[in-house]
Image: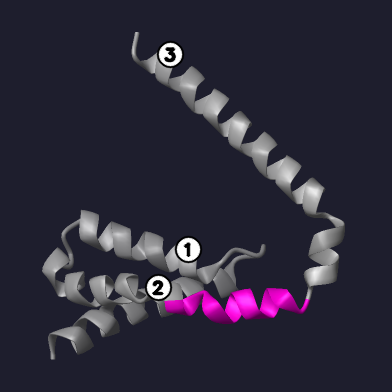
Amino acid sequence: MRLARDFLIILACLQLGKGVAALLPFGFPGSIIGLFVLFMLLSLQLIRLNWVHDGGQLILRHMALLFIPVAVGLLGYLDVLSDGLWLIIGTSLAGLVLILLCVGHLYQRWSR
């Protein structure tokens, strides 16, 4: 019964996020808004952590299985990915360096 309650709360937050995303005039992932709704409900203590803890742990434990269909779907675009592989790697590394520089700079400013 606890897992059903946990999943229902998480699913309700997801559906609320998708509803809000549908109302927005720009494209935004409803799942991200749903996570934000869940975070706000937990932060404001409108729902208790133990109400979603077990269900969340079960989802996280099996999350790797959820990425298998995506990985298999990417195999269909292997020729497109291989053509731009160096561009993908280069932009990923440049983004990583940029993020590290920004975070390091902000940390130095705030630690003074």
Q: Residue furthest top?
A: 112
Circle 2 or circle 3, nearest the eye:
2
Q: Which residues are magenta?
A: 65-76
Seen in the picture, residue 85 relative to 11 is either above or below; the reply is above
Question: Quadrant of the image for the N terminus?
Answer: bottom left
- Identity, as a three-letter code, of the amino acid under mark 3: Arg
Left or right of 109, for residue 88: right
Secondary structure of residue under mark 2: helix
Which residue lies under the disc numbered 1? Answer: 32
Marks 2 and 3 close (CB-CB < 8 Å)? no
The answer to which image quadrant residue 102 occupies is top right
User: Front-most of 48 and 86?
Assistant: 86
- Identity, as a three-letter code, of the amino acid under mark 1: Ile
- Which numbered disc, 2 or 3, marks the residue that appears first in the sequence? 2
Residue 109 tag number: 3
Which residue lies under the disc numbered 2? Answer: 63
